[in-house]
């Protein structure tokens, strides 16, 4: 089972930027079908922010971050990144990266049940 570790979280003012990184542990050799970023604010359910279907190189973003967040990946390093610009207070949450070894993730990139490996999360706080 892969171990994922997020980094890059922190506190910024509204309008600022952060770049999150997700690193996978060495030795991971399972086939990954999808990679994604999720977030969870206090008292709310964990929601999908962006998901990538590796096979089709397709990325889906939740409407609230479209035009502000950009996902990228380094397949050779098995890493995924999230550039977050024009941050808003409502973006404040714990952000998690997740990988899926289940092809079913390609049908719904935001469905948490298809993601098999999760990081511990990194806190993002945006002040107004």
Image (tube, grey):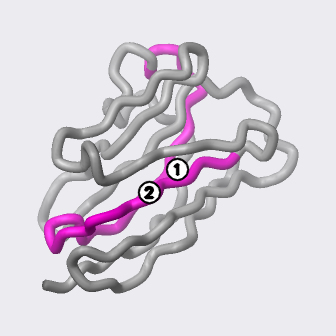
Residue 96 drawn in magenta: yes
Q: Residue at x 37, y 31 (%)?
A: 113
Query: For mark 1, what is the residue?
Result: 118
What is the x, y in percent for residue 89? 16, 74
First to last magenta residue range:
79-105
Q: Nearer the viewer, residue 85 or 37?
A: 85
Compared with 19, 62 (above or below) is above
Q: Residue at x 12, y 66 (%)?
A: 43
Residue 68 drawn in magenta: no
Quarter of the figure that contains the N terminus: top right
Label disc, if present, on residue 96 of the rendered structure: 2
Label 1 – label 2 distance at C-alpha = 7 Å
Verify CB contact (< 8 Å) between mark 1 and mark 2. Answer: yes
Q: Residue at x 32, y 46 (%)?
A: 49
Quadrant of the image occupied by residue 125: bottom left
> Dot 2: few (<14), some (14–19), or many (≥20) neighbours within 10 Å?
many
Compared with 32, 88 (above or below) is below
Q: For the residue labelled by badge 2, is the local secondary structure a helix, a strand or a loop?
A: strand
Q: Earlier in the sequence, mark 1 or mark 2?
A: 2
Q: Nearer the viewer, residue 96 or 79?
A: 79
Quarter of the figure that contains the C terminus: bottom left
């Amino acid at each position: 089972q892969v171990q994922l570790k997020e980094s890059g979280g922190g506190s910024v003012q509204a309008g600022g930027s952060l770049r999150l990184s997700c690193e996978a542990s060495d030795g991971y050799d399972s086939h990954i079908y999808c990679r994604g970023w999720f977030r969870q604010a206090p008292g709310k359910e964990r929601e999908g922010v962006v998901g990538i279907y590796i096979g089709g190189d397709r990325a889906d973003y939740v409407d609230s971050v479209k035009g502000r967040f950009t996902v990228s990946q380094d397949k050779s390093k098995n890493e995924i990144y999230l550039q977050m610009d024009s941050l808003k207070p409502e973006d404040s949450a714990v952000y998690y990266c997740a990988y899926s070894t289940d092809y079913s993730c390609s049908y719904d990139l935001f469905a948490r049940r298809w993601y098999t490996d999760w990081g511990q999360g990194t806190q993002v706080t945006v002040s107004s």
